[in-house]
Amino acid sequence: MITSTSNAKVKELVQLQKKSKARSKAKKFVVEGIRMVKETPRDRLEALYISESFWNKYGNPIEGAFAEMLSDKVFAYVSDTKTPQGILAVVRQIEYDVKEMIQGQDAHILILDNLQDPGNLGTIFRTAEAAGVTGILLSMGCADIYNPKTIRSTMGSLYRMPFAYVEEFIETIQEVKKNGIKVFAAHLEGKNSYDQEDYRKGSAFLIGNEGNGLRQEVADCADVRIRIPMQGQVESLNAAIAATVLMFEVSRQRR
């Protein structure tokens, strides 16, 4: 049992929890909680840690995986939650091929421009899986998908939703269009309501920053600007909510 916070493995866990650069360099991230750990693909499970009290109550719930025990004090030290469940795992990151993601007549893609809120991003991933999205492209200015809060918000969809951060963001959008996928921008200046368009063939949606919306150069890449009609004095919707409305309209039309 590891009982010291100065232990090298404990220090690594803290770095992976708190620093995006550490996660990027190691190509690893940390997931917490029995559900997220159980859903982790076995071939990506790098290490498993269990608190002393969890071990005494449940043992090792991941059959065939070696688990290291941490004292409750040390586990609380490395945990990102106020009330730790007592189990966490180090998971290997995976890279998806952008070219594969942006092909196919049935493509249903989200393109996220500088989304900042980790909870928003995680919710979008979870909803995207439910709505049948085939891939998510993110600008380099988006929040880190491997942020602990984001991971919790995905509720496991992180493991199943293809995604990629792209440096050449505008160029990638142009590639999407070249593949016969129509690009729609969720925009306050949209002429048509979102439910007046046809999404039964390849479609991609540009979703902008929570505070500033889409950057002008990104919005200009769209084939069509669409809006979500609203009543009252509300000017715009939360980015995750707006994305949800659009994603499920695609799902509805394709059913």
Image (cartoon, rainbow, N blue to C red):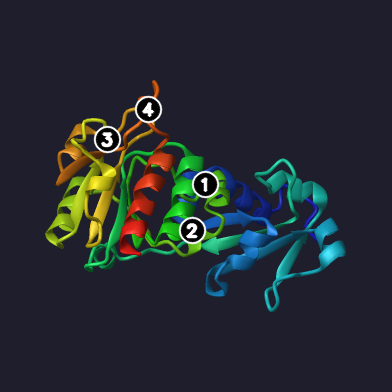
Which residue is depicted at the point 43% across and 64% down?
94
Q: Nearer the viewer, residue 162 or 165?
A: 162
Left or right: residue 95 versus residue 55 is: left
- Looking at the picture, which amino acid does disc 2 mark? Leu
Q: Amino acid at mark 4?
A: Gln
Mark 3: few, some, or many residues within 10 Å (few <14, many ≥20)?
many
Q: Which residue appears at 38% of the width and 40% of the height? A: 242
Disc 4/disc 3 C-alpha distance (Å)? 22 Å
Residue 201 image label: none
Q: Quick one: label 3 or label 1, which is nearer the N terminus?
A: 1
Q: Earlier in the sequence, mark 2 or mark 1?
A: 1
> Residue 52 is drawn in which quadrant?
bottom right
Amino acid type of disc 3?
Leu
**Which of the two marks, 2 or 4, is nearer to us in this view?**
4
Question: Is the residue marked by circle 2 packed among few (<14), some (14-19), or many (20+) residues within 10 Å?
Answer: many
Q: Secondary structure at mark 1?
A: helix
Does residue 34 show up?
yes
User: Are the two marked residues, 3 and 2, in contact with CB atoms closer than 8 angstroms?
Assistant: no
What secondary structure is found at the residue carrying circle 3?
A: loop
Q: Which mark is residue 158?
A: 2
Q: Residue at x 40, y 38 (%)?
A: 239
